[in-house]
Amino acid sequence: MRPRGRLWLVCIILLTVPWTHASAEGQASDQFCSLIPTLEADGERANASVAWQVGLGPRLPGSNASEALLTGLEERHTSWSFTRDTHAYGNTGLTNLVAMYPPEADLSTDLALGFGAHYDSRHMADREADEANRSTPIPGANDGASGVAAVEELMHLIPTMNLDHAVVVVMFDAEDQGPVPELEGSRRWADNLSEAEREHLAGFVLLDMVGDASLDLANISSNHPALNNVMRPLSEAMGLVSGQYGCAGTTNRDVYQPDVRAWIGDDHLNINAVEIPAMVIIDHRYGPNVTKLDDGYWHSLQDTPDKVSAESLETVARLVELGLRSGAWMEAVTPEDPIEEPPTIEPQPITFAGPLGLLMLGWAFVIGLASISIVAIIALRRLRPPPASTTWSWDEA
């Protein structure tokens, strides 16, 4: 190829690649945008769930309030199958509630995606300004009830989604107990999964503290990167990233802040620890104008239903719903089909069949015989003694 032809080829490639990339991005955006009008998560229904949970009283391990919550969830979602995962814990024990859809699904044999929240509320208000109130259990409207409410909203909708995989939901106990939150329920559940169950649980999305009326979702650095990378495109499609206008019909809001990074210790850590990709969606700045987790209403008696909004609950529930309906969560953690190795071609023995084969064999014999003859002649000539040399003398002359 002439230099000028090569130059034209390079130019064509350089011009084609950006347009190809832009086209691929457009297709992904269109995929999300077409689903925005179909989202059904209901913030008002989720907000009613928060009020119901708080109304039961402190949901401490082994308490009557916890039993009433678990029974209520089982009765409200009859299309799911439920299992109570119980473990020894202090003087009370702990109980994780595990739900499966479809109800006949088996996590040891069926590919599944997991969602969950902790349902227990903290046993002490250790962030209260008044030291006299620090031993009082908190209401846990946002820290506990909001995550359960958002996941419960998904449980209402999943049976209508016609997904091509199973879904497991786990409501964890004993996340918020101890001087430092112990995350004990999720650790017991994750550690007791069989190898087959771990292989079939593709990923897990945890929801915690997602009801704050002033909702701020940071980029959580303790999340599994494959799942965490899904947050931005989903959020942009819904118009939740400041300055990034979403799909038609969405209103731009500053909710997900990809440049604000925070490390959060939550139940997702125990699931990541058993090599299941897991992430948490959490508002780590609970309250207006709060800059860090330790401030605001967190672990205080101010964590009440009036601090939680239906709009925030609906925003988060629909964000997760969009990832479910589009398949984005599952695609992020499901490896692509492995490239099949090309079939091994066994070497075939050379045969001399037919007239052509016999002719080739004959020529090979003749050439071989001629080669042997030439080698023999050369060898014999080298073995022959040289002729006697003739000497001259002037006397004989």
Image (cartoon, helix red, strand yellow):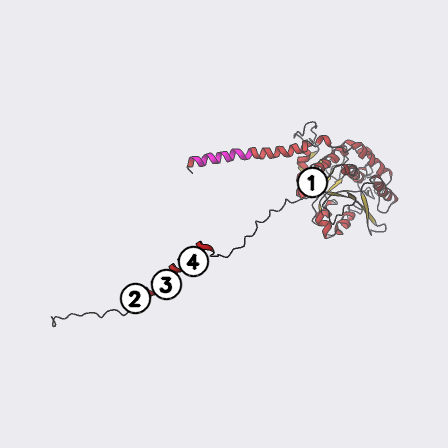
Mark linked to residue 361: 4
The mark that comes first in sequence, 2 or 1, is 1
Foreground mark, 2 or 1? Answer: 2
Separation of residues labelled 3 and 2 (CA atoms):
15 Å
Magenta span main SS: helix
Q: Which residue is label 3 attached to?
A: 372
Give amino acid for label 1: Trp
Depth check, front residue: 61 or 338: 338
Q: Is residue 311 magenta?
A: no
The mark that comes first in sequence, 1 or 4, is 1
Foreground mark, 1 or 4? Answer: 4
Dot 2: what SS? helix
Q: Which residue is label 1 attached to?
A: 329
Visible residue check, residue 298: no
Magenta stretch, residue numbers:
4-18
Q: Is residue 16 magenta?
A: yes
The residue at the far front in this view is: 355
The mark that comes first in sequence, 3 or 4, is 4
Write down the quadrant of residue 54 in the picture. Answer: top right
Give amino acid for label 3: Ile
Separation of residues labelled 2 and 1 (CA atoms):
85 Å
